[in-house]
Amino acid sequence: MASNEAIRQRDLAVLWHPTTQMKDHEWLPLLPVRSGHGVWLEDMDGKRYIDAISSWWVNLFGHSNKFISAAVSEQAHCLEHVILAGVTHEPAVRLAEKLVAITPPGLDRVFFADSGSSAVEISLKMSFHYWRNTGVEGRNRFVTLSNSYHGDTLGALGVGDAGLFKEAYQPLLMEPIVAPSPDCFALPRDQWDAHASLRLAELRQLLVQHRDEICAMIIEPLIQCAGGMRMYPPSYLTGLRQLCDEFNIHLIADEIAVGFGRAGSMFACEQGEISPDFMCLSKGLTGGYLPMSAVMTSNKVYEAFYDEYTSLRGFLHSHSYTGNALACAAALATMELFEARDVLADNRVLAQQMMDAISPLHEHPHIGDIRQTGMVLAMEMVAQREPMIQYDWKERRGMKVLQYGLQHGVLLRPIGNTVYFMPPYIIQEDEIAQMAKAAMGGIDLATAD
């Protein structure tokens, strides 16, 4: 069997890794993973690591989950894939029925795709095309929140506000209207709703100015994940839905990262008691097994495209693997695991255990903010607490936390100076304790100078 070092050398000769400056791997060794079971990953040399970030937020019920694995295996012996244009199959139908049943009211149609970015692209195109099909002229812009991220394909990148990701591609991108984020960084919880109200008032001014240009507003409900796990209250969602209705624009909820229980409810929009016009789903949809995404929308939107072929009103968008039967089987099994026990109630216990485990950080001189929404907990490393002074991002202190975590059996992947936990829902209390101990040790090391 190959060793860690052998796999690393073979990898560096041929692979180009995502969101990575490959030169870093001259000093930061790759982690070669040969297997995963539960919350644990195992490298080629037999060392184990807790997957504290659910492998980029996709894994809900653990690696090599027997129930999901069996469902995928059974499906593979029946039908692995078939074109979904002019063809259908029961797993796709069952999954669409399930998603319609569990998502907020009014989301009655499902369009499958392959990734979160693809789902965002589809929602943007559907919104624009809806207004075109209904005879409304001049609507070709989107509103986004500052510090937002919606994916790396050009359309998704264009409606984000993550400068680090999009700066090089700016000449290729659409220009969104950027509204101030309701992010409540470093604010006490009792001030979150008031802050959200101020941001809604500022948004209203933008909508008054641009109302006739706007197709839709796109948001990450409750947590701006790639933007550093920045969080805001459900009251913003409630007020935003009211504004979108008042100004007659679509609301796109990018629940790719926060859906399926991450934010504490099955879908984050539920906490604001709203239904968006479009909901983008991916990541946890298949329990971390296979790439798949879905765009949920209303019959009203669907009917704007429903006409004779010669009207040219159809939605001409496709992916070769749309509705892949294996991915549908994984997603259906994942949904069954939610039904088998009260996952959300169990997660509330786990969330409290995570917060309790990092309680010493509340007094840490270089932790400026600790925030939690559901199963997402974030800790912000700062140069100084009062007045708060941020570390220079070029110092890359988060990398020290990553390295320390690996040395102590935990896979962490800080976003800049933000250390966060987003573990699978099957993590145990002793594993939470190990995860927290590694994070706190890494933070001590990273902030020591």
Image (spheres, rainbow, N blue to C red):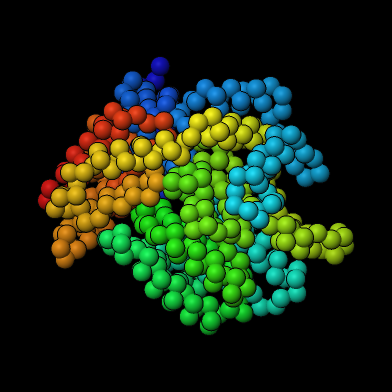
Is any atom of residue 433 visible in this view?
A: yes
Identified at 22% across, 36% down, the residue is: 437
Identified at 60% across, 70% down, the residue is: 245
Is residue 159 positioned above or below 83 on the image? below
| Displayed quadrant of residue 432 | top left
Is residue 299 positioned above or below 56 on the image? below
Is residue 296 positioned above or below 408 on the image? below
Give the side of residue 79 with respect to residue 191, left or right. Answer: right
Question: Residue 311 location, x and y as percent?
Answer: 85, 65
Give the side of residue 438 with respect to residue 141, left or right. Answer: left
Question: Residue 194 location, x and y as percent?
Answer: 36, 69
Q: Residue furthest top?
A: 1
Identified at 17% across, 59% down, the residue is: 385
Question: Residue 195 location, x and y as percent?
Answer: 35, 69
Question: Residue 127 location, x and y as percent?
Answer: 65, 64
Query: Nearest the camera: 191 or 288?
Result: 191
Q: Residue furthest bottom?
A: 209
Is any atom of residue 21 visible in this view?
A: no
Identified at 65% across, 22% down, the residue is: 74
Give the side of residue 115 with respect to residue 80, left or right. Answer: left
